[in-house]
Amino acid sequence: MKATLVIKNIDNLITLKGENRARAGKEVNDIGLITNGVVAIKDDKIIFAGNELPSNIEVDNDTLIIDAVGKTVTPGLIDSHTHVVHGGSRENELAMKLKGVSYLDILASGGGIHSTVKATKEASFDELYNKANKSLDTMLSFGTTTVEGKSGYGIDDFDTEIKQLEVAKKLNEDHPVDIISTFMGAHAIPKEFEDNPDAFVDIIIDKMLPVVAEKDLAKFCDVFCEEGVFTIDQSRRILLKAKDLGLGIKIHADEIKPLGGAELAAEIGCISADHLIAASDKGIKEMAKKGVIANLLPGTSFNLQTGNFAKARQMVEEEVPIALSTDYNPGSCPTENIQLIMSFASLIMKLTPEEVITAVTINGAASLGIAETHGSIQEGKTADIVVFDTPNIEYLIYHFGINHTNTVIKNGKVVYTK
Ligand SMILES: [Zn+2]
């Protein structure tokens, strides 16, 4: 078999070798580290990862060789919670935030998400496409090869919801980074439904979800379950309907108040529950029991300046599988930099380098239902790989705030080099 690409002399090859599922608890300590490793790729698939190329793998003049001496190689990073397709920006909220006005207060005064809804509504397909395309370029430069992208800035304006999902679909075809779409019409209560939010929930269930499923515009459905947004009962109704229609289900849970979103995620079989800053001890236990992935977003906590972060160590002890994402969005976390999120996760939430790298590779893949094909460097899997210009994974986390990417390989092709 002839290799099309070989990465050789890898100081630290982090394979995440193992079963194609989310990892939790102590098993996360084994990240499949190979020193002085080599990876061989044929077309878009990995054909070997180990110490020495076996004799049945040919290398000739057409094989692209990358010398990774002094470098660290990992699976392509997976950013499994973003709101990448949106209009506008919200730097005008900075002054309010500095005065200590809370997210929910900014929202109640008609700012926050409502201003992004307006900007997204007013933006043309091409404007949304070009803005998100630029963000995907940035993400790719930081080593992200797959992202999840949510709708949710049309809310009751279903055409805008569809527009967001269609932009994501087109970008998934055009851009090297894969986008997996999530329908999140239940992102806020529209002003005209404030007195009767259940009527809006009915619209999502009866009018929106069936169209999204029928047009195959999203793989997942997500709900912002929070005080002042969607209640536990409303979230349950929406997500069970989505499940009925064959969509995977996710939930923005217990971000600000401990409403019981973690418990609901376990009860109805969400693939992930995201944020979880205020999740209860009981909710964490129930997530562990059901294998619900905790998708933690420390960049959001940092940016909101509340001082409150998810109890990541407790979740690890309870054996909840953990993913980490940027939550890239114009309000609560305007950054595409997954490497920064990895540093925050370690320095602030006290996750170990092994826990961090697992969270942004195989566990991120599992939270998007693609662990069979992505998230580890193993024979037969998709060749999404990052070469970092760092001697080891600790250095990548320790030397924070800059971009350590040297080369990004997507589907077996070099798509970014420094
Ligand atoms: Zn979010």
Image (cartoon, rainbow, N blue to C red):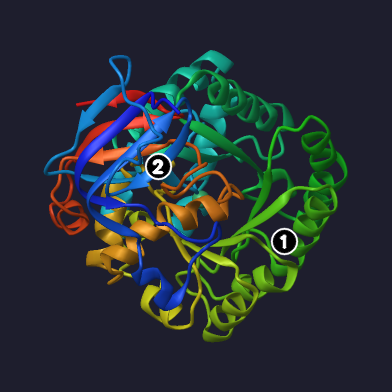
Residue placed at 17% from the left, 54% from the top? 392
246 above or below 217?
below
Q: Residues within 10 Å of mark 1 (few under 14, many from 20)?
A: many
User: In the image as oriented, which residue stretches furthest toward the bottom?
Assistant: 282
- Residue sitting nearer the eye, 118 or 379: 379
- In primary-sequence order, the first of circles 1 and 2 is 2
Residue placed at 45% from the left, 18% from the top? 130
Identified by mark 1, the residue type is Ser
Residue 307 place in picture, x, y as percent = 30, 69
377 left or right of 263 in image: left
Residue topped by disc 1: 235
User: In the image as oriented, which residue stretches furthest toward the front?
Assistant: 55
39 left or right of 21 in image: left
107 above or below 69?
below
115 left or right of 12 in image: right
Quarter of the image with the C terminus is: top left
Q: Residues within 10 Å of mark 2 (few under 14, many from 20)?
A: many
Quarter of the image with the N terminus is: top left
298 left or right of 242 in image: left
Residue topped by disc 2: 48
Label 1 vs label 2: CA separation?
44 Å
Nearer the observer, disc 1 or disc 2? 2
